Amino acid sequence: MPSASDTVTPRPEHAGSRRTTLLRIVGLVVLAAALLSFPSLAPNSFILSVGVVIMSYAVLATSWNFVGGFTGYISLGHASYSGLGGYATALLIIHTDVNPWLAMLAAGLVVAALAVPIGIASLRVRGASFVIVSIALVLILLLVFQSWGSFTGGSNGLRVPRPFGTDVLRPEQHERFYYLHVALLAVALLVWWAIDRSRFGMGLKAIREDEDKAQSLGVPTFTYKLIAFVVSAFFTALGGGLYALWFGFLDPIFQFSILVGSYMVLMSLLGGIRSLFGPLLGAVIVGYAVEYFKNEYGDTQFHLVAMGLLLALVVLFMPDGIIPAAGSLVDRFRPERSSIREVTQADLAEQRRTEGGSGRSRGAGPGTDAPASPTESPSASPTDSPTESQGARS
Amino acid sequence: MSLLVQSLVLGVLLGGLYALLAAGLTLYFGVMRVVMIAHSAFLILAAYLAWWFTNQTGLDPLFSLVLTVPLFFGMGVFMQRVLISRLRPATLTMMSVLLTFSIALVIEGMLGFVFSGTQRRIRLDYGGASFEVLGANVAVVKLIAFGLAVVSLGALFLLMKKTQFGQSLRATIQHPDAARLIGINTDRVAGYGFGLGLATAAVGGTALALDSTFYPSLHWHWIGPLMAIIVVGGLGSIPGAAIAAMVLGMGQALLQIPLGTTWAQTFFYVALFVTLMVRPQGFFGGRLAQRF
C-alpha cells in the first residue's frame, strides 16, 4: 500500500518544536493505519460500501477545498465537475474503448480544460457572481444531461462498464475501490499540502483574507484564483470518475444535484477549510450522518431539513470548523501562543536574525517567501535579486 | 404569426412575474449585499400557503395575500435581524449564501414533510377561462398574475421614490455609512428592506399558485433564472432587474418555438455567461455591482 503513506512526510519548519513534529508524524501514521485497516475491520460488505461512499465524499470535499479553503470563494456547484468527470469517464470508455483508468484521467483533464472558461467568467467579479455561476452551472448541466438523451442516456441514466472483470465479486470490488479512493485522497491531500506551503498558496490565502490588499501587494490575483479553481475542478472530476467506475450507473438527477455540491461545502466547513484534514474529518462525520439518515428515514424529505439545520448551525456558530475550534481548546492548556498565523512570531524573528540587516523594508516579500524556502540564500529579496546576485558574482 | 404573438404575450406575462421576484432579490442585495438563495423557496412556500388557504376556507387564493404578505414581511425582518446580522461582515457575502441556502433546504424539506412531494394545483372556476387578443390566447389567470406583479412593482416603486422610508432605504443602499451619519437607523431600515423583499415572494407565490402546478423542489427551477436576471441587470439595480426580467422572459418565450421548453431555459444561463464575459458588472449596474 504505497498510497496513504505518501502523506506521512515530516513537516519540519512549520511546527516549531520537535515534539509537535513527532506528534504530527504519529498522528499521520495513526490516521493512515485507521484508513487502511478499515476494510479488514468492516463486518460486512454493506459497511464497506458505506466506507467507499465516505471516502468518495472525502475526495470531493478535499478537492473542493482547493478553491474554497485557499481563496475563500465558496462554490455550491462543484457537483457539476464531479458529474462531468463521471460522465466523461463513462462516455470515453463506451465510445473509444480506452482503458478505464486512462479514461478517468483524460476525463479529469477534459473537465479541467472546461473549467478554464467557466473560471474566467465566474472569477472576473467578486464573491456573489461566483456563487451564482456555480449554482447556475449545476442547473444548466442537469437540464442538458437530462434532455440530451441520445448522447448521455438522458433521464434513464447511463450504465458505466466495470473496470474489473466479472470474476471479481462485490465485496472484493468494494475493497479495491476503497483503496483506490484512499490513494486518490492521499494524492489530493499531498497536493493541497504542497500548495499550502508554497508561495502560490500564500498568495491564495492573501486573496482569501483581503483581495484588494493582495492585489495591491502584487499578487496576480486573477491568475492565482483561476489556477486554484482549475486544480480543484480536476481533482473533483477525478473523484467523480472514480465514483462512477465504482457505482457503475449515472443518473443526472444525482450527479448534477445541488445537494452533492452543498455536502462538499458542509463537510469542508464543518471540519475546517483552513486545515489539511478538515474536509476529511467533515466527510467522515457528514457522510456517516447522511448514510444513517438515508437508512433510518429513507424516502422522506427529513434528511433535507437535517442537512439544512446542520449547515445553518455551522455557518452561524462555527464558521471556522471543528479542527480550529478543537485546536483553540487545546491551546488553552498550552503556554501562551500569541499568533494564529501560518508564520509564527518566533519563526519570523529567527528568520530576520539570519537575514541580518539586509533589506529591512521589504514589506510582504519575506513573509510570503519564508515557509517555502527558509534555506534559500537570505540576501535575495524578490524585488532586487537580479542585481544583487549579479553583484555577488562579479 | 399567431404563434409568435402568442409567445410574445406569454413572454410579457412571465416577464412581469420575473421582474417582481428579481426586484425582491435586488432589494436584499442592495441593503445587505446578500445573495438570497432562499427567495424562490419562499415563493413556493407562499404558493403552498395559498393552496392550503383555499383548501381550508374555500375562498379565492388571492385573499391569502392578506395573511401571507404581512407574515412574509415579518419573517424577512426576523431573518435579517436575527440571522443575517449575526454573520461576520468580512465573510458576509459567502456565508449569507450558505445560510440562505440552508434555509431553502429546510423549507423544501418541511414542505415535503408536511404536504408530501405530490404535485399540487389550485382548482379555480375561472382557471380555464381565456380570451383572444390579436389572435393570441390569453388565460385569465395569467393576466391576473401579471396584474398582481405590475401592481406590486408599482407600489414598490412609489414606496421607494415618494415616501420618506423609501428615501432612507435608498440612502442605505447607496451608502450605509453616510446614511447612518445623517441619522438613518440603517439596521432597522435594512430589516424592513429585507421584509419588503420577502413580501415580493409572497405576492409572486400567490400569482404562481393561480396558474401552475407546484411541488417542493420546484424552487430550484426558479432560482437559476432569477439569479441570471439580477446578474444581467446588474446586481443592486431594481430597474435593471426589471428590464432584464422582461427581456429574458420574452427571449425564453420566443425561443420555445424553435427549441422546445427545456432547451429554451438554457437561454438564461447563456445570457448569464455572456454577461459575465462581456460586462461583468451587468448591463444596468453601476459602481456597486463592480465590487461583487
Image: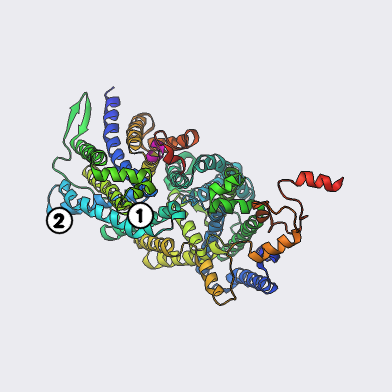
Residue designated by label 2: B56
Q: Is residue B96 above or below residue A295?
A: above
- Quick one: label 1, few (<14), some, or many (20+) residues within 10 Å? many
Q: Residue at x 19, y 38 (%)?
A: B144
Q: Are marks 1 and 2 on the same chain?
A: yes
Residue extending farthest to the bottom is A333
Q: Which residues are magenta?
A: B229-234
Residue located farthest toward the right when viewing the structure as drawn: A394
Which three-letter amino acid code belongs to the residue tagged 2?
Gln
Residue B248 rendering spot, x and y as whole percentages: 36, 34
In percent of width and height, residue A160 lies at 53, 50
**In this view, A221 is above or below A373:** above
Q: Chain of mark 2?
A: B
Residue displayed at 37% across by 56% down: B84
Amino acid type, residue under disc 1 in the picture = Ala
Q: How far, Cα to Cα, is label 1 from label 2?
A: 25 Å
Residue density around tag 2, few if under 14, some if 14–19, many if 20 or more, within 10 Å: few
| Nearer-the-camera pick, A80 or A356 | A356
- State the mark number for residue A149: none
User: Which secondary structure class fits the magenta region best?
Assistant: helix
A159 part of magenta stretch: no
Disc 1: which residue: B104
* Coloration mode: rainbow
Q: Secondary structure at mark 2?
A: helix
Q: Is residue A5 left or right of residue A298?
A: right
- For disc 1, the chain is B
Q: Residue at x 72, y 52 (%)?
A: A359
User: Left of A387 or right of it: where is B41?
Assistant: left
The image shows a total of numbered marks equal to: 2
Residue A109 in view, yes or no: yes
Q: As drawn, is A150 to the left or to the right of B170? A: right
Q: Earlier in the sequence, mark 1 or mark 2?
A: 2
